[in-house]
Image: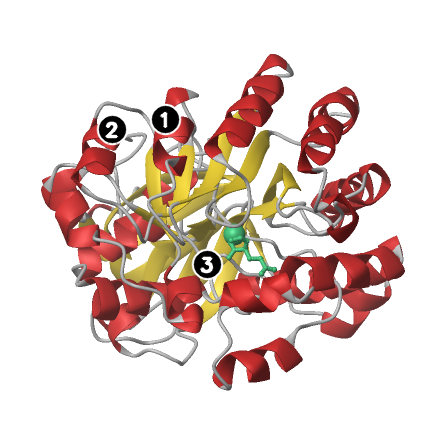
Amino acid sequence: MPILIKNIKELVQVEESPRPKVAGKEMSELNTIRNAWLLIRGDRIADFGHSSRIPAGIEDGNNVEVIDASGKMVFPCFCDSHTHLVYAGSREIEYIDKIKGLSYEEIARRGGGILNSAKKLHQASEKELIEQALTRLQEIMMLGTGAVEIKSGYGLTVEDELKMLRVIKKLKTLSPITIVPTFLGAHAIPAEYQNRRGEYVDMVIYEMIPQVASEGLADFIDVFCDRGFFTTDETDRILLAGMKYGLRAKIHANELDYSGGIQVGVKYNALSVDHLEYTGNSEIKCLKESMTMPTILPGAAFFLELPQAPVRKMINAGLPVALASDFNPGSSPSGNMQFILSLGCIKYKMLPEEAINAVTINGAYAMGLSEEYGSIARGKIANLFISKPIPTYEFMPYAFGSNKVETAILNGEIVKWRNSEIAKS
Ligand code: NIG
Ligand code: FE
């Protein structure tokens, strides 16, 4: 049955002519309609407008489910373009080591970090991984996320990378959230390959990529290109191999150093380069000449206390910016995009309008989804949420720490929260 949402206090991020992304000055513009209605038919946004011009006939029929949103706002769902949310268990013990003064790289060198998660993932069954991931998906949907990218990368063997990607594929059938899978075999060098890293890179290229592609398990390919992880030469080889199999690049870059990751990503026309704490003038120039979305992960920078990526400088230079959660057990154990929105404003000095664009339309672009997601536009997928009563849209980033989402609608259907039932299925 069609859904009519009426008396919307403010309909946020409305587009008459949808754009694939917004950049530079445009990022501070956010179209809204105060006192609005919105009609959903099937899984699409059919129409919307000001309450004074509600088309006759819509409300009188019995065939419309009417939601009264008085005092509440409607936003497009968040598009979280970078997560590792399929993982086994958690790593709070390393977090204590971190509090005591060890760095992310020191923890990794001691066999903690990604290798620790790989060990846990190896021991977990697919069913356990699915249950844990469904709980996390449920949580992020309740917090307003409607589309999410999920990476492999805690497998680090052919079998376990495929196991992770099959779990991600299964999640697509079990959850109403839209999921985009990315292959990240080159997340870390396993301990037994430490002295023969070339062999691990060859395994990624000659064994993992062909199998991932032949089973159609991923849309994108990622490499953790940074100091202490994969070099630019290794990244170059892996991205080239991935492209031959139709996997577009979307990489971790410049989190720990001026590693050259941004440049190698742009060289292969990466859809996004992510993290970017170490971004200088030459990296900004390189990004300006590309179609690559610079993506900032404020949760990881917050949790690891990294330097701030120069977001203001990037936007002032005319670049687009996306914000994503990086939900993972080691550097960002939260997928709360409302918190990411707040961090964008507080830590990176983004205006609320810029941050909202960064977590919606630009996040959608960074997953290749912006034709159908990321804004309120006729014909786009009806992935949106109704807020709790809030005074202004600026309240969203301002009131950090509480959930301002009341009702999530994904693919035109109201999401029902059935935690225990979902976990059992
Ligand atoms: O994006 N930087 C690399 N990978 C993840 C961390 C993964 C982990 O520590 O488990 C990140 O921060
Ligand atoms: Fe990451």
> Where does the C terminus fall, quadrant-wise?
bottom right
Residue drawn where x is 80% and y is 60% of the image: 119
Q: Nearer the viewer, residue 32 or 144?
A: 144
In front here: 350 or 313? 313
Q: Could you classify mark 2 by the number of other residues whose Cα lies within 10 Å: few (under 14), some (14-19), or many (20 or more)?
A: some
* Residue 124 placement (x, y as % from top left): 86, 61
Residue at mark 3: C-beta within 8 A of ligand 2: no
Residue at point 19%, 55% (across, down): 353
Query: In which quarter of the view is residue 273 placed?
Result: top left
Judging by the rendered image, the residue that carries numbered circle 3 is: 325
Disc 1 target residue? 266
Give, as a three-letter code, the residue at label 3: Ser
Q: Earlier in the sequence, mark 2 or mark 3?
A: 2
Q: Residue at x 80, y 63 (%)?
A: 120
Q: Which mark is residue 286?
A: 2
| Residue sitting at x 55%, y 50% | 410
Q: Position of residue 190 (x, y in %)?
A: 73, 49
Q: Could you tell me which secondary element the residue under label 3 belongs to?
A: loop
Secondary element type, mark 1: helix
Q: Residue furthest top?
A: 244
Cβ–Cβ below 8 Å for labels 2 and 1?
A: yes
Mark toward the viewer: 2 or 3: 2
- Is 396 located above or below residue 5 in the figure? below
Say if mark 2 contacts mark 3, CB within 8 Å.
no
* Viewer-proximal residue among 134 and 283: 283
Q: Say which amino acid is labelled 2.
A: Cys
Viewed as shown, does residue 159 lie left or right of 261?
A: right
Q: Of all residues shown, which one is farthest toward the front?
A: 195
Element carrying mark 2: helix
